[in-house]
Amino acid sequence: MASPTLRRRRLSRLLLQQREKRGLTAKAVAAEAKRRTGKPRGWSEPKVNRLETGVWRRLSVDDVELLLDIYKVTDPEERAGYASLVREASQKGWWATYENVLGSGQLIGLEAEASSIRSYQSMTIPGLLQTEVYARAMATASSMGDASDVDRRVEARMLRKAIFSRADPPAFWTVIDEAALLHITPDLKDQLEYLVEVSYRPNIGIQVLPVANGPHAAMTGHFVILEFPLPDPPVVYLEAMTEELYLESEEQVRRHVRVFDFVQAAALSVDESRELIRNRLSSL
């Protein structure tokens, strides 16, 4: 199934581009939409802004067709493409059933169609490479005593890994700070075994950044760079304690790609990293 998250972002971006191409303000578009529909309460400047930033809850084909009329988009094939995007963006991915533990689920929706994922992790194993035992330990620790949703968190985490079973799985490359390995206790050693196992897959690369290397370019925290087939631009995902942040400007993406390049160059090679993981495993 096409990712509704990615389609939503694409549709919003296209609507914004159409308005800017016509040199119209959101306020002017809302006023024209009111005039054409004769419904003064149906359209407003905030509504136009919501449609262009992807924060709408429901979107009708009629609303989009009205905007296309205002933007003088008359080509039937192009308009049909917009209608298709509306339908696809309005669907629900499997992650929607886990909203109580995943929040927006935007990251999973983006992972679903990513062609390339690059990740730097400072203190934990990347979610897409976690075993069930490790994921449960992480979910239990983050629940701070409230274990009511741990099972669902773990279940959702395991379902995320299904992207590697796609006909065209994404290329996944991660740099993991050695500190994340040092937090793995003997009862979680299956996580290290799993890292060694998947490191042989052709579409997965794992590098470890030794603690002994000292300060490095990504000391401020972990991030994920997701790339997609055209026409969708790359996105950088950042996560704080209770907040998700998605960066899309060319400069923001370029900066994080540069940071990733620096930490990747500073990290051990894939073979050296595999050996370090094995050594850590044998020490438990």
Image (cartoon, grey):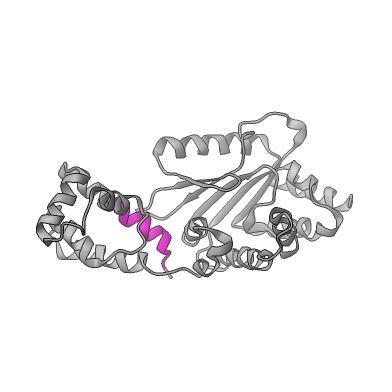
Q: Does 131 sit left or right of 63 as displayed?
A: right
Q: Is residue 195 on the magenta stretch?
A: no
From which residue to which does the magenta span run? 2-14
Who's the residue at 81% across and 51% down the image? 278
Q: Does 276 sit left or right of 269 as displayed?
A: right
Q: Position of residue 116 (x, y in %)?
A: 51, 53
Residue 75, quarter of picture: bottom left
Magenta segment main secondary structure: helix
Q: Residue furthest top?
A: 215
Q: Give the camera-side residue of 182 and 36.
A: 36
Who's the residue at 42% across and 60% down the image? 5
Q: Give the camera-side residue of 235 and 106.
A: 106
Who's the residue at 74% across and 46% down the image? 180
Q: Does 166 sit left or right of 48 as displayed?
A: right
Residue 260, quarter of picture: top right
Q: Position of residue 189 (x, y in %)?
A: 82, 57
Q: Position of residue 231 (x, y in %)?
A: 34, 53
Who's the residue at 71% across and 65% down the image? 132
Q: Position of residue 49 (x, y in %)?
A: 29, 48
The answer to whether 235 is drawn above or below residue 42 in the figure is above
Q: Is residue 13 on the magenta stretch?
A: yes
Q: Does 23 sit left or right of 177 as displayed?
A: left
